[in-house]
Amino acid sequence: LPAKDPAVELRQEALFKDSSPPEEDCPICNIRFPMKNETCTLACCGKSMCIGCMVQNMDECPFCEEDLQQFNSDTEGIISRLLDRIHHSSDDQDKMQALNMLASSYDTGAGGIGVRRDSKKAHQLWMEAVELGGSKDAHYNLSQSYSEYHKERGVEKDDKKELYHLEEAAMLGDAAARCELGKYEAARGNWDRAKKHWMLSAAAGCEGCMERIKRGKKKGAVSNDEYKKTLRAHRKSLNLTRSAQRDAARERLNLKVGPGGVGKM
């Protein structure tokens, strides 16, 4: 048998370590941040708040007191502010956040800042964010940039790089990346690896992965102990992020929580 590569073994050990999302509270309501699709990051100053506090502060930024109605209507101003943070901020985390926000806007041609869709530009900006040290969002978005989806937009598909950046995002605590890694392994018949990823993601609060573990239990692929342990952790994560204000915000924004996470009704 060929000798095992110690570096590969160490990476695999780190990959399946319990890398739950950072225990970070919304600075406004002081309740644990929910999954990232229910968190708002402001372009004006780069600060983040939960969806509940966002709905309560739609006119003025509670951090820098920017007039959000005016700021969000000034597309050139938003781009200028993001570029200023990218080129002049002394905080690498702030730079990465601004790069990721600008890249996401180029990727979709949306985001309210008036840029045209440009997947190659988005890819370049995500690369810059990763080179600065890499946030979980930058790694996750870069992994998607290397996928089949972006091949149609002029970015070369690269399965190895897609997988590498998914793993990096997962090890930084990105539950969505864990979910994708589970799908990747399941598609290749690696059920044990898929199950481990989905259990970790479900424990972090991912509804879709909890549903997969539930289906696995019915098929006998997930033990009763594994199911109970994952369900307890899943409920604990959800309870830590639940509030009446957030529930009201979802209702106001016409959002629902389903097996795939949060989306429009």
Image (cartoon, helix red, strand yellow):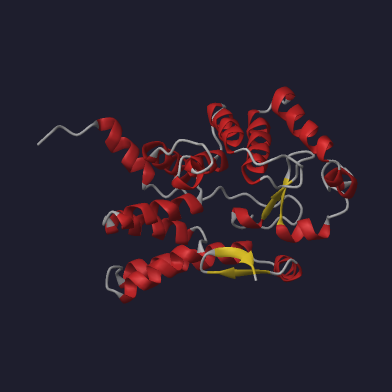
Q: Is residue 39 above or below residue 158?
A: below
In this view of the protein, which residue sits in the foreground, 214 or 186? 186
Q: On the rendered structure, is 192 left or right of 171? A: left
Quarter where residue 213 is shown: bottom left
Which residue appears at 69% of the width and 40% of the height?
116
Q: On the rendered structure, is 53 left or right of 220? A: right
| Residue 94 percent coordinates (x, y) | 68, 33
Quadrant assignment for the C terminus: bottom right
In this view of the protein, which residue sits in the foreground, 150 or 141? 150
Q: Is residue 88 above or below residue 227?
A: above
Q: What is the number of callouts on the image? A: 0
Q: On the rendered structure, is 143 left or right of 33? A: left
Q: Is residue 209 above or below residue 65?
A: below
In this view of the protein, which residue sits in the foreground, 265 or 114? 114
Q: On the rendered structure, is 66 left or right of 253? A: right
Which residue appears at 23% of the width and 31% of the height?
5
| Residue 223 percent coordinates (x, y) | 29, 69
| Residue 75 percent coordinates (x, y) | 81, 40
Q: Is residue 6 above or below residue 109?
A: above
Q: Residue furthest bottom?
A: 218
Which residue appears at 76% of the width and 69% of the height?
252
Which residue appears at 51% of the width and 41% of the height?
145
| Residue 224 percent coordinates (x, y) | 32, 73
Quadrant assignment for the N terminus: top left
Quarter where residue 156 is shown: top left
Q: Residue furthest left?
A: 1
